[in-house]
Image: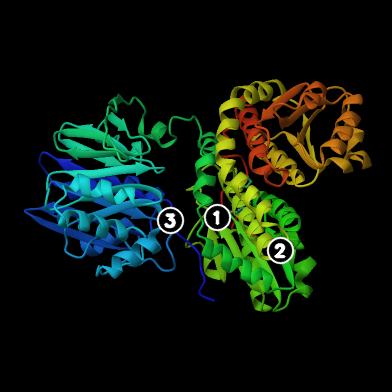
C-alpha cells in the first residue's frame, strides 16, 4: 500500500537583508539554530547581481553543507529553510526554497496550503510547470503571475496569499527587487530582528538572539517588507499599514527556547490549542485511507504504551460511540501474550506513538506484520521507525515535544482519533449527516475551547497544586470516555511530582479503592455534563461522605458539582462528552506540573524516565 500520510507542518525559515557581508553564512547559522524544527532537508536562496542562486538537498544541514557548501552563495540578501515531516523520502526537489517557471522568485514556507490541489490544477492549465510535489510551489507560480502582469513584489505576494487557505509563514525574494524580502504569516510563527548590519526574519526568536535583541513580532495576517535599512508592516487583507513595535528582548537564548516559560512542559501545555488546530488539518485523503483499511478488517486493535495508550482507550470509546466499531485497546507490552494467536490477514493494528520509536510498540507491530495484519499508525515524528513499518500513517502536527511528559502530543492524538471516528461514523451510516456536522463543528472549535480553558484555570490550578503538593496519594476518577482522562491525570502526576496516584473508573471505586479514603484524601473527579454525570455524582458523594477532599473538573456553570467540591475547576460549557478528554485533561496536566515544581522537581526531566523508551 502506498498510501502513506504525512504533510509538512513544522519547518524553520530564516533570512536576512544585510548592509554588507555574506547573507549565506548568516542564514546557514540561523538554520542550524532552527534545526530542531525540522531536519529532513534544507536549502538556501540568495539574490546577487540580478540573479537568483539556490542550493538545497536532503538530509541534515551539516550533511548538505558538506556536499554543496552553502557558504559560497553570493549576495547580501537571502532566505533559507529547514524542513520536517515530509511525504515519503525527502528529496532535493521537495526541499525549499522553491521557484517559479522563470527564476523570478524563490520562496520558503512553513505551514500547510489546504487548497493547493485546486490552485495547482488551475496553474498547470495555464501552462505553469511544477518541479516539486509540495504545496509551497503554488505560491511561487502565483507570485510569478503577478510579477509578469507588472505588479511589485509586495503586491504580487499579497495577491497570491489572498488566494491561499491554510496556514503559512512565508518569505519571498526576487532578483527584480534585489534588496528586499517580502514575508508574511498566518497561524505560523514569524519574527523580525533588527540589527546593526541589517534586518532578519526567523520562525522563532531564539534563532535571532545571537544577532540582535531587537525583535518585531508579526501578527496573524501581517505582511512585512524588510530591507537592510528596516521594515514596514501591513495587513494582507487590505494593505493597511500597521505599527508593530520593536521589543527589546532580555531573554537568554535558553530562556527564549522555552518561549519565556520556565519549563518546556509548561510551554507545551500552552501550545496545545495550536497543536490541535494544526493536527486537525490532516488531509482528508489520509483519514480516508485509514477508514478503508479499518472497514476492510474484521478485528481492530489499538496498541500503544503510557500516555499514548490512554489515547487508545479514549479512541476505542470514540470508535464505539460514533462509528459502532469494536476496537480493543491493548498495551503494546501485553499485545503478543493476549492477542498473538488472534491475528490474521483480516486484523488491523492501529498503533499510537509520539516518538515512533517505542520498542514495545514496534515489537507488537512487527509481530502483527509477520502474521499478515495491516498496520496503521499515528505519530508525531515523521521518518521514525513506526512510519517505515506502517501501511498508512498520519502525523500529529504538535511540533517537537521536549518535556519528557507527553502533553500536546496526547491531545493531538485524540484529535486525529476523533476525526477518524467521525468519518467512519458517517461512512457507516451510524451518524446522521446533521449529527456528524454538529460534532465536526464542535471538534474544530476545540482549540478555541482549550484556549479559553488555559486562559481561565492556570492560576487556580496552581493554587490547588500548592495546597496538595505534599499529599501522599491521589485518586483520579471518572466514567465513560473520561476514565482515559483520569488514568492520564494520574500518570502525569506520578511521573513528574512522584506523588502516588491512581486513576480508576469511578464505578469501580466502591469495589476496593474506597477502603483507602480517610479525611482529606484528594480525589480528582472529571465530571463533564452528559450521560455519566448522574451516576458520577453518586460516586462523588460516596467519597465525600468518607472524608475525601473533592477536586472536580466540570463545566464552569455546573453549580451542583461546585457545591460538592472543595476545589472546583471550571472548563467552558457545551463540549460534547465524546470530545471532552481533549480539554478536560488540560487542568490535570497543569496540576501535575505545578505539584512537581512545588516539590522542587524538574518536570522536564523526571527521574528514571526517558522521552523515547527503546527497550522492551
Ligand atoms: C508519559 C509518557 C510515556 C509515553 C510512553 C509511550 O508522559 O510520555 O508514558 O507515553 O513511553 O511513548 P510513545 O508515545 O513515544 O510511544
Q: Vertical placement of 533 versus 320: above or below?
A: above
Comes first in the chain, label 2 or label 1: 1
Residue found at x 28% / y 51%: 160
Q: For residue 203, say whether it is visible.
A: no
Comes first in the chain, label 1 or label 3: 3
Q: Vertical placement of 267 versus 438: above or below?
A: above
Confirm or deny contact between disc 2 and disc 1 (CB under 8 A).
Answer: no
Q: Which residue is mark 2?
A: 429
Q: CA distance from mark 1 to mark 3?
A: 26 Å
Residue found at x 69% / y 35%: 498
Residue found at x 79% / y 46%: 480
Circle 2 crowding by C-alpha within 10 Å: few under 14, some 14–19, many from 20: few
> In the image shown, does 248 or 50 lie closer to the viewer?
50
Q: Position of residue 281 (x, y in %)?
A: 50, 53
**Which secondary structure, mark 3?**
loop
Q: For residue 55, say whether it is visible.
A: yes
Q: Which mark is residue 355?
A: 1
Q: Which residue is mark 3?
A: 114
Comparing labels 3 and 2, the label whose residue is closer to the camera = 2
Quadrant of image for the N terminus: bottom right
Q: Quadrant of residue 193?
A: top left
Q: Is mark 1 within 8 Å of ligand 1?
A: yes
Comparing labels 1 and 3, the label whose residue is closer to the camera = 3
**Which secondary structure, mark 1?**
loop
Q: Quadrant of residue 521?
A: top right
Q: CA distance from mark 3 to mark 2?
A: 27 Å
Q: Position of residue 577 (x, y in %)?
A: 72, 43
Q: Position of residue 84 (x, y in %)?
A: 41, 56
Amino acid at each position: 500500500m502506498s498510501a502513506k500520510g504525512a504533510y509538512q507542518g513544522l519547518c524553520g525559515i530564516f533570512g536576512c537583508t544585510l548592509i554588507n557581508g555574506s547573507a549565506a553564512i548568516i542564514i546557514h547559522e540561523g538554520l542550524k539554530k532552527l534545526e530542531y524544527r525540522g531536519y529532513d532537508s534544507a536549502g538556501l536562496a540568495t539574490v546577487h547581481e540580478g540573479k537568483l542562486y539556490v542550493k538545497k538537498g536532503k538530509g541534515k544541514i551539516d550533511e548538505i553543507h558538506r556536499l554543496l557548501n552553502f557558504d559560497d552563495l553570493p549576495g547580501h540578501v537571502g532566505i533559507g529553510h529547514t524542513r520536517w515531516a515530509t511525504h515519503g523520502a525527502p528529496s532535493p526537489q521537495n526541499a525549499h526554497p522553491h521557484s517559479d517557471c522563470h527564476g523570478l522568485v524563490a520562496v520558503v514556507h512553513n505551514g500547510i496550503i489546504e487548497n493547493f490541489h485546486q490552485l495547482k490544477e488551475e496553474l498547470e492549465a495555464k501552462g505553469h510547470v511544477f518541479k516539486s510535489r509540495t504545496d509551497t510551489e503554488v505560491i511561487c507560480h502565483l507570485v510569478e503571475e503577478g510579477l509578469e502582469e507588472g505588479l511589485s513584489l509586495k503586491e504580487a505576494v499579497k495577491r497570491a496569499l489572498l488566494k491561499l487557505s491554510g496556514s503559512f509563514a512565508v518569505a519571498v525574494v526576487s532578483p527584480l527587487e534585489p534588496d528586499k524580502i517580502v514575508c508574511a504569516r498566518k497561524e505560523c510563527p514569524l519574527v523580525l530582528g533588527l540589527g546593526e548590519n541589517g534586518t532578519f526574519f526567523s520562525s522563532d526568536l531564539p534563532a535571532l538572539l545571537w544577532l540582535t535583541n531587537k525583535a518585531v513580532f508579526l501578527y496573524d495576517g501581517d505582511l512585512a517588507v524588510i530591507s537592510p535599512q528596516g521594515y514596514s508592516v501591513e495587513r494582507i487583507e487590505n494593505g493597511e499599514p500597521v505599527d508593530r513595535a520593536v521589543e527589546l528582548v532580555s531573554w537568554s537564548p535558553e530562556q527564549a527556547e522555552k518561549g519565556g516559560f520556565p519549563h518546556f512542559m509548561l510551554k507545551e501545555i500552552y501550545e496545545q490549542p495550536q497543536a490541535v488546530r494544526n493536527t486537525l488539518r490532516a488531509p482528508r485523503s489520509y483519514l480516508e485511507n485509514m477508514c478503508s483499511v479499518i472497514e476492510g478488517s474484521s478485528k481492530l486493535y489499538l496498541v500503544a504504551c503510557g500516555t499514548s495508550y490512554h489515547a487508545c482507550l479514549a479512541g476505542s470509546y470514540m470508535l464505539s460511540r460514533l462509528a459502532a466499531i469494536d476496537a480493543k485497546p491493548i498495551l503494546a507490552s501485553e499485545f503478543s501474550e493476549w492477542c498473538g494467536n488472534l491475528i490474521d490477514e483480516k486484523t488491523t493494528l492501529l498503533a499510537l506513538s509520539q516518538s515512533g520509536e517505542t520498542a514495545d510498540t514496534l515489537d507488537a507491530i512487527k509481530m502483527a506484520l509477520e502474521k499478515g495484519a495491516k498496520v496503521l499508525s499515528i505519530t508525531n515524528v515523521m521518518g521514525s521507525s513506526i512510519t517505515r513499518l506502517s501501511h498508512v500513517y498520519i502525523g500529529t502536527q504538535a511540533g517537537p515535544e521536549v518535556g519528557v511528559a507527553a502533553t500536546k502530543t496526547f491531545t493531538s492524538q485524540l484529535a486525529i482519533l476523533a476525526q477518524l471516528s467521525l468519518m467512519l461514523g458517517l461512512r457507516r451510516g451510524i451518524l446522521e449527516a446533521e449529527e456528524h456536522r454538529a460534532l465536526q463543528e464542535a471538534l474544530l472549535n476545540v482549540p478555541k475551547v482549550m484556549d479559553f480553558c488555559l486562559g481561565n484555570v492556570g492560576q487556580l490550578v496552581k493554587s490547588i497544586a500548592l495546597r496538595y503538593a505534599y499529599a501522599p496519594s491521589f485518586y483520579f476518577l471518572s466514567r465513560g470516555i473520561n476514565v482515559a482522562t483520569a488514568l492520564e491525570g494520574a500518570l502525569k502526576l506520578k511521573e513528574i511530582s512522584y506523588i502516588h496516584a491512581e486513576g480508576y473508573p469511578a464505578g469501580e471505586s466502591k469495589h476496593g479503592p474506597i477502603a483507602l479514603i480517610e479525611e482529606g484524601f484528594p480525589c480528582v473527579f472529571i465530571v463533564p455534563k452528559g450521560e455519566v454525570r448522574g451516576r458520577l455524582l453518586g460516586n462523588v458523594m460516596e467519597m465525600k461522605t468518607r472524608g475525601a477532599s473533592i477536586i472536580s473538573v466540570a463545566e464552569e456553570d455546573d453549580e451542583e458539582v461546585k457545591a460538592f467540591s472543595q476545589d472546583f475547576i471550571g472548563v467552558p460549557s457545551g463540549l460534547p462528552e465524546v470530545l471532552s478528554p481533549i480539554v478536560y485533561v488540560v487542568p490535570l496536566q497543569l496540576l501535575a506540573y505545578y505539584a512537581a515544581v512545588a516539590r522542587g522537581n524538574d518536570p522536564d526531566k523526571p527521574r528514571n524516565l526517558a522521552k523515547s523508551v527503546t527497550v522492551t
